[in-house]
């Protein structure tokens, strides 16, 4: 992958993650209207502090990308959050799935850019 493109994606994705992770704590972006089922699920995530864990992982992943340390590890961990975001929106809030799609696409691009770091764990 082109090093300049990889650097640009790494910085944009890092800022994306820090912004949306911080929003889970600071609520500086307005929340969209959600269906009752989505609101129940979201309330359960908030009441069990799971959303705080997700926010911390997003912020740590964003910082890791910006300082270029542990990015490969954070992309594997972040893939769990990306898949859950896609599933949440696909089944409960399909109208607002585009943010989750962007998250997943950035995550896949970054996983591909770190592919040389995964050779040892993918060896049979």
Image (cartoon, helix red, strand yellow):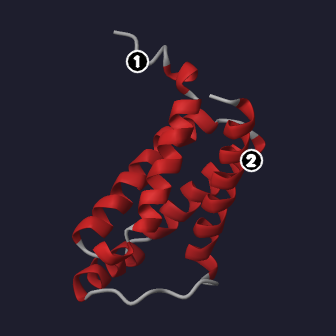
Q: Position of residue 89 (x, y in %)?
A: 32, 69
| Residue density around tag 2, few if under 14, some if 14–19, many if 20 or more, within 10 Å | some
In the drawing, does residue 39 fall left or right of residue 120? left
User: 116 above or below 19?
Assistant: above
Q: Which residue is mark 2?
A: 66
Which image quadrant: the N terminus? top right
- Residue 50 showing in the rendered view: no
Q: At which x and y percent is residue 59?
A: 63, 58
Residue 2: horizontal and vertical position, in percent? 68, 30
The residue under the point 77% across, 43% down is 67
Q: Secondary structure at mark 1?
A: loop
Res 23 quadrant in image: bottom right
Q: Which residue is mark 1?
A: 122
**Residue nearest the viewer, comparing 45 with 32:** 32
In the picture, the quarter occupied by the C terminus is: top left
In space, the residues marked 2 and 1 are separated at their CA atoms by 26 Å
- Residue found at x 63% / y 53%: 13
Dot 2: what SS?
helix
Give the mark nearest the N terminus, 2 or 1: 2
What is the quadrant of residue 21 in the picture? bottom right
């Amino acid at each position: 992958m082109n090093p300049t493109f990889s650097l640009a994606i790494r910085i944009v994705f890092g800022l994306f993650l820090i912004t949306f992770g911080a929003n889970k704590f600071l609520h500086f972006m307005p929340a969209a209207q959600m269906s009752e089922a989505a609101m129940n699920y979201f309330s359960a995530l908030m009441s069990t502090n799971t959303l705080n864990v997700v926010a911390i992982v997003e912020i740590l992943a964003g910082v890791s990308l910006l300082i270029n340390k542990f990015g490969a590890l954070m992309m594997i961990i972040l893939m769990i959050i990306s898949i859950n975001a896609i599933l949440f929106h696909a089944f409960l809030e399909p109208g607002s799935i585009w943010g989750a799609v962007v998250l997943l696409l950035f995550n896949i691009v970054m996983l591909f850019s770190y592919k040389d770091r995964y050779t040892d764990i993918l060896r049979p």
